[in-house]
Image (cartoon, rainbow, N blue to C red):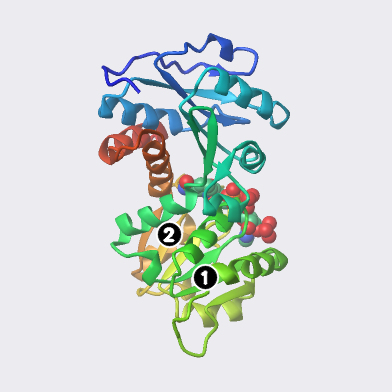
């Protein structure tokens, strides 16, 4: 990649398979694919990262319905894109289109970042890695050293649980409204988290139904509580857990960043717990993608500033 002044070739135009022919071959193009994709905040902070690093690149949004994904990927290969991000529901199909995948992407069955290495496509999933970096930044602790409870087992919950298992965290308690989803996830992660380290009589990995008594009991030995459900996105969503379960010793992370403080975070804050929202996870998954593409350390302060501006925070 040429190191020149950042080429201001980016626009807020949303491209499609039919219009992506208009994207210039130089400077090196990157993109985020999604359906819809207009809302994506990735262009804001990836452009800031390329600019700060003095790398000539362009980063676009490409609206990609699932049935057009293969054709869009072929077109990006032809145009020698340096790499791309993708959002749900494309993350699962993207795994089938890459030549190689990282361990986290394989376990998750989902790719959110692709590196085009001279025509060889390498798939990664940086959501979990971004979350670990976010926890370190927000709370000054490593997931590896934590007893973690994750609420939710959709795309985000699975990504975080997989990363926590890869990090071999002290304990991992997985809770979901639809119990079968965490039962399956726990069975899949059991060999991943396994180590010979003895941690006492309690199981290292537990799947729980959404049962207040069971959650209350497990929360007593938890350091880090994470909301990876979508409950809290809407102002009328209920408080996810009763306030009395939120104690001052807890670190509480909500993957939701809009609103800035969900009801869960407000209640946890009131109880004296330390809290943080998901903006840092979004930032750090993007920073990890930038490093994969460029081999450079991501300029976090500039990326954060651009993200906060784009998110209106
Ligand atoms: N900060 C970031 O970078 C980032 C990245 C990705 C996602 N996220 C956030 O993560 C959250 C989940 O996203 P996703 O892609 O995983 O969504 P998803 O695949 O649709 O999964 C939604 C999850 O929320 C649970 N859920 C929904 N309503 C609930 C309720 N009222 N009570 C309890 N559980 C409820 C669902 O349980 P069931 O299985 O029972 O339906 C499921 O586990 C969203 O809020 C999203 O904003 C943040």
Image x and y of residue 131, in percent: 43, 54
Quadrant the C terminus occupies: top left
Pointer 2: what residue? 253
Q: Is residue 116 above or below residue 259?
A: above
Pointer 1: what residue? 193
Q: Residue at x 48, y 27 (%)?
A: 118
Q: Is residue 200 above or below residue 174?
A: below
Image x and y of residue 233, in percent: 54, 48
Q: Residue at x 64, y 27 (%)?
A: 64
> Do the numbered discs 2 and 1 sit on residues whose CB atoms are within 8 Å?
no
SS under mark 2: strand
Left or right of residue 89: residue 168: left
| Spatial CA span between label 2 and label 1 | 21 Å
SS under mark 1: helix
Image x and y of residue 26, in percent: 42, 13
Q: For this rendering, which residue is in front, 95 or 13?
A: 95
Note whether residue 181 is visible. Answer: yes
Q: Earlier in the sequence, mark 2 or mark 1?
A: 1
Quadrant the N terminus occupies: top left
* Crowd rating for badge 1 (residues with CA inside 10 Å; few <14, some 14–19, many 20+): many
Q: For this rendering, which residue is in front, 203 or 198?
A: 198
């Amino acid at each position: 990649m040429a190191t020149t002044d950042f080429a201001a070739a980016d626009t807020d135009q949303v491209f499609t398979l039919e219009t992506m022919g208009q994207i210039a071959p130089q400077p090196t193009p990157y993109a985020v694919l999604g359906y819809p994709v207009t809302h994506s905040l990735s262009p804001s902070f990836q452009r800031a990262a390329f600019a700060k690093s003095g790398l000539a690149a362009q980063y676009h949004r490409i609206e990609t319905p699932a049935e057009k994904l293969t054709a869009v990927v072929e077109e990006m290969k032809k145009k020698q894109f340096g790499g791309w991000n993708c959002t749900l529901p494309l993350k699962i199909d993207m795994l089938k289109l890459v030549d190689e995948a990282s361990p986290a992407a394989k376990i998750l069955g989902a790719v959110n970042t692709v590196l085009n290495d001279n025509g060889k496509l390498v798939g990664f999933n940086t959501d979990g890695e971004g979350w670990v970096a976010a926890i370190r930044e927000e709370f000054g602790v490593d997931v590896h050293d934590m007893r973690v409870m994750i609420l939710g087992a959709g795309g985000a919950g699975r990504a975080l649980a997989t990363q926590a298992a890869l990090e071999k965290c002290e304990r991992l308690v997985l809770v979901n409204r639809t119990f079968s989803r965490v039962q399956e996830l726990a069975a899949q992660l059991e060999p991943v988290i396994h180590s010979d380290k003895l941690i006492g009589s309690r199981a290292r990995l537990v799947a729980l139904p959404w049962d207040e008594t069971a959650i209350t009991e497990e929360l007593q030995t938890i350091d880090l509580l994470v909301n990876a459900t979508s409950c809290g996105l809407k102002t009328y969503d209920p408080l996810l857990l009763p306030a009395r379960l939120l104690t001052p010793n807890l670190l509480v992370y909500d993957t939701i960043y809009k609103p800035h403080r969900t009801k869960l975070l407000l209640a946890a804050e009131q109880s004296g717990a330390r809290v943080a929202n998901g903006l840092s996870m979004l930032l750090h998954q993007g920073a990890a993608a930038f490093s994969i593409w460029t081999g450079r350390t991501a300029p976090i302060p500039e990326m954060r500033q651009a993200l906060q501006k784009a998110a209106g925070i």
